[in-house]
């Protein structure tokens, strides 16, 4: 880990910025550089102390560690030239929330061994450098894919770093990861966005919404505050799995609607009771 003297973070948003904050904390001797398509983001990040300096793509040859945290459809395009630009001893970690396409994009790259596909299961509904917070990844799961294709020594350094960040490690096939994440994350965001849309369209008087909205509604639509610029590429990259999860969700909603229309309240009760065991699942996760 002491070899990570020059760290470059590409994409200074919630995840990249929070990673930068934690890396500055656990690697105080390192220098953090930021690369972002938004000059405002870079200026904000420097001003907030999220990174030490703004930088350019051309400087990646100096990097010991690169964190790629950009929209997932862009990661597929940027990862190959990032690997082209870095040295043979540089570790490049992509932390996007889809893994199949990005792993496929560099499967035959000459520096594939420099790459580690990762997905930290952490985040909030906020975005940009101001959303970056320390300890976002503490006690969270870091999913790693295709570690057998990453250089052994670089992987060892990455594992040491994740351990210092107090993260749990889980290994998954990238395409299995994308299928599962569609259900537990991507579908949740779609549900939140569409619930918010439904209520806004029905209740034109916003004051009525806020006067009547309780904590249940607020927690359910929390994710609808998420940045569409982040989530549209995710739905694009994981389209097949998202459509599959949506189809099953719509089937369940339709069934619930049908039993309610039929005044079958015993089945309404059973539908909810059979799902109540999710409490024990979520308790185990916490």
Image (cartoon, rainbow, N blue to C red):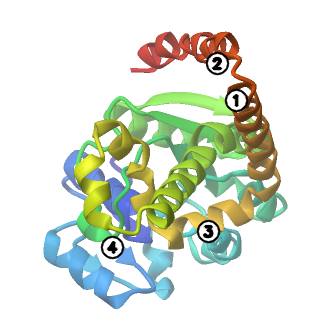
Residue 250 sits in which quadrant?
top right
Q: Which mark is residue 232?
A: 3
Rounded to the nearest angstrom, the CA distance separating label 1 from label 3 is: 29 Å
User: In front: 169, or 239?
Assistant: 239
- CA distance separating discs 1 and 4: 51 Å
Give the residue at x 34% y 90%.
Answer: 39
Q: Is residue 132 visible?
A: no
- As helix, strand or loop, the secondary structure at mark 2 comes to helix
Residue at x-position 49% and y-position 61% = 202
Q: Residue at x 52, y 73 (%)?
A: 229
Residues at circles 2 and 4 in contact by the CB criterion of under 8 Å: no
Residue 81 point in image, percent of width and height: 66, 78
Q: Could you tell me residue 272's position as x and y percent?
A: 58, 17
The residue under label 4 is: 33
Marks 2 and 1: in contact by CB < 8 Å?
yes
The numbered dot on residue 57 is none
In this rendering, the label closer to the viewer, 1 or 4:
1
**Which image quadrant: the N terminus?**
top left
What distance separates the C-alpha of mark 2 from that of mark 4? 55 Å
Query: Residue at label 2?
Result: 268
152 in relation to 83, above or below:
above
Q: Quadrant of residue 6?
A: bottom left
Residue designated by label 1: 256
- Compare marks 1 and 4 and give the one earlier in the sequence: 4
């Amino acid at each position: 880990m002491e070899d990570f003297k020059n760290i470059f973070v590409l994409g200074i948003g919630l995840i990249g910025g929070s990673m930068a904050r934690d890396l500055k904390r656990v690697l105080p001797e390192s220098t953090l550089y930021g690369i972002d398509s938004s000059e405002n983001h870079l200026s904000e990040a420097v001003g907030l102390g999220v990174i030490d300096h703004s930088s350019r793509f051309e400087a990646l040859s100096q990097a010991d560690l690169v964190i790629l945290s950009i929209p997932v459809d862009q990661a597929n395009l940027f990862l190959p030239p990032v690997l082209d630009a870095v040295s043979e001893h540089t570790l490049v970690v992509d932390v996007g929330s889809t893994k199949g396409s990005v792993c496929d994009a560099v499967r035959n790259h000459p520096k594939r061994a420099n790459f580690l596909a990762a997905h930290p299961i952490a985040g909030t509904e906020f975005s940009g450098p101001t959303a970056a917070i320390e300890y976002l990844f503490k006690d969270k799961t870091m999913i790693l894919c295709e570690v057998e294709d990453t250089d052994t020594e670089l992987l060892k350094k990455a594992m040491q770093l994740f351990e210092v960040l107090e993260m749990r490690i889980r290994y998954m096939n990238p395409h299995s990861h994308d299928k599962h994440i569609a259900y537990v994350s991507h579908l949740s965001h779609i549900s939140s966005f569409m619930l918010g849309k439904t209520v806004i369209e029905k209740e034109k008087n916003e004051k009525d919404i806020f006067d009547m909205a309780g904590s249940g509604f607020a927690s359910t639509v929390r994710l609808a505050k998420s940045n569409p610029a982040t989530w549209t590429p995710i739905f694009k990259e994981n389209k097949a799995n998202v459509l599959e999860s949506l189809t099953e969700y719509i089937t369940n909603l339709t069934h619930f609607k049908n039993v309610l229309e039929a005044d079958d309240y015993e089945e309404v009760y059973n539908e909810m009771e059979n799902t109540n065991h999710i409490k024990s699942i979520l308790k185990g996760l916490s």
